[in-house]
Amino acid sequence: MLELMTCAEMAAADGRTIAGGTPGIVLMERAGQAVAERVLAGVAGPQRIAVLCGPGNNGGDGFVVARLLAAAGHDVAVHALVPPDRLTGDAAEAARGWQGEVLPLAGWRADGVDIIVDAIFGAGLARDIAAPLDAVIAAVNAASAQVVAVDVPSGIDGDTGTVRGCAVRADETVTFARRKPGHLLLPGREHCGRVHVADIGIADATVAALDVRTAANAPGLWRDKLPRPDAAGHKYKRGHLVVASGGPARTGAARLAARAGLRAGAGLVTVASPPAAVAINAGHLTAIMVRAVDGAEQLADLLTDARFSALVLGPALGIGEETRRMVEVAAAARRHLVLDADALTSFSNNLAGLWQVVTSAAPAGVVLTPHEGEFARLFGEAGGVAQARSKLERARAAAAASGAVVVLKGPDTVIAAPDGRAAINENAPPWLATAGTGDVLAGIIGGLMAQEMPTFVAACAGVWMHGAAAAAFGPGLIAEDLPEMLPQVWRTLLD
Ligand SMILES: NC(=O)C1=CN([C@@H]2O[C@H](COP(=O)(O)OP(=O)(O)OC[C@H]3O[C@@H](n4cnc5c(N)ncnc54)[C@H](OP(=O)(O)O)[C@@H]3O)[C@@H](O)[C@H]2O)[C@@H](O)CC1
Ligand SMILES: [K+]
């Protein structure tokens, strides 16, 4: 159930289910039933309920909800954007089942209402919400009533999570068959409240046949691919991660990444340090080794030893030609690469160079971990990125343009593979946004890749473990705490 279906995929699933013999009105009845059950869960005694209905099937769901809630003894008022005689298809049929009055939606006020059911727009939202509906949305959001949204909060684009003009802020959202990307992407996620997925009779096989390429990032996506050390295994079998350090005043980032890589399970981790910083790095490291490596040429020498299986390049490494050369040398040596921070910025506006790196590293995998600023510098000009409607589509276009797995970081990190697979992460607590946490993320992913975990799932798992480690620590977190929480995270994953 981790798939996230776009509105078009949902419509296709709906169409196939109807073609398979389930009438559309039956799906609508089940949808309305699921919403009504959610409204009734936790209410004691009769409630004053306003059901706000739009002109399409989302509104049709609303009429079903109104009928069921009234039958359950509640005081229900229906306010509709268009008169029922202007509805068509299943929505018209659902409206015929509502015996009560239908009041206009324009000018609606929330006075005296305990619960609002938002059935104005769902998957069919096609443009920005304008007057007079914007005032209705504002009244919903100003009300003290409990707000339950049908499918998506009205005004949120289910595919992109963007606000089209204005949008309802719901306490709960009931969606159907699967969640949609807009339930996870910001700002949509913040408008949904708690999201419930109701089974309305769309078969798993119907969803599977659509080859849905987007998923919520959770262990079910990659748990079976996690590296599992066996009792007889040698540490070299668990890979050897190399993290390149910056100069004497810029060594902390590499050590954070290195520590995270070790906690992620890499058998050995070496910090490749400029000679002038070896003493500083060595003074702060115990289980992690330090090697003097002076620039790209010496990195190439180091990588003649085949046991170094993966590299993290970028954290505080310095921006410019030498860093770019180090990336190229590591790619030519065909090692798994995580490129972060300065390594990314060293390829600003040089998509061709980045493509070359990814191509020469193959079959080893390359993961890029940009935040929004780095992403704009790398992919601002890339085909498909400027036209993309959402963070999900931008990450996907960037992965296709670079040939690498792209981890576009943020509170709703998107991980995208060049073959079109993508996952949206949702477990990062707000206190994860603090100095150095990006270095740790690069290290975790590098540690997993050093153990030969396949690239896309290693990136997904790394992002999730990073979020889980932060959530487990709680507020007050600093980057150094994250690697130390990984054993606890591992225990939840390996049983
Ligand atoms: N798929 C399934 O399996 C199932 C789906 N179900 C339900 O169907 C819902 C999708 O229904 P839907 O396609 O009729 O779209 P919906 O959201 O009601 O809106 C379309 C209407 O709004 C209008 N409109 C759009 N934007 C506007 C704006 N800014 N301002 C003003 N008007 C605007 C648009 O007008 P038009 O663009 O045509 O001019 C059109 O009239 C889905 O979310 C779920 O709740 C369930 O019944 C169970 C089975
Ligand atoms: K809605």
Image (cartoon, helix red, strand yellow):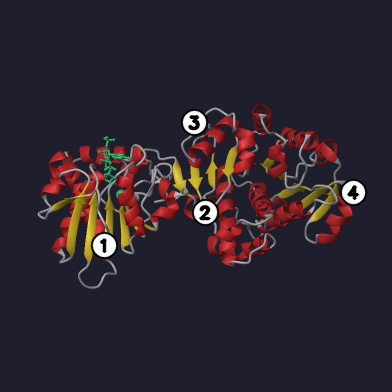
Q: Position of residue 337 (x, y in %)?
A: 68, 41
**Marker disc for residue 223:** 2
Q: How crowded is mark 4: few (under 14 residues within 10 Å), some or many (20 or more)?
A: some
The answer, for residue 320, to whether it is visible in the render is yes
Q: Where is residue 20 in the image (x, y as percent from the top left)?
A: 21, 39
Q: Which of marks 1 and 4 is nearer the N terminus?
A: 1
**Marker disc for residue 387:** 3
SS at badge 4? helix
Alpha carbons under labels 4 and 2: distance apart: 41 Å
SS at badge 1? loop
| Label 1 CB sits under 8 Å from any ligand 2 atom | no
Q: Nearer the viewer, residue 285 or 119?
A: 119
Tag count = 4
Alpha carbons under labels 3 and 4: distance apart: 46 Å
Q: Which of 446 and 265 is in front in this view?
A: 446
Q: What residue type is labelled 1?
A: Asp
The answer to whether the residues at label 1 and label 4 have Cβ atoms under 8 Å apart is no
Q: Nearer the viewer, residue 492 or 352?
A: 352
44 to 170, vertically: above or below: below
Q: Which of marks 3 and 1 is nearer the N terminus?
A: 1
Residue identifier under label 1: 111
Nearer the observer: mark 2 or 1; the answer is: 1
Q: What residue type is labelled 3?
A: Gln
Q: Residues within 10 Å of mark 1 (few under 14, many from 20)?
A: few
Q: Which amino acid does label 4 sit on?
A: Ala
Alpha carbons under labels 2 and 1: distance apart: 50 Å
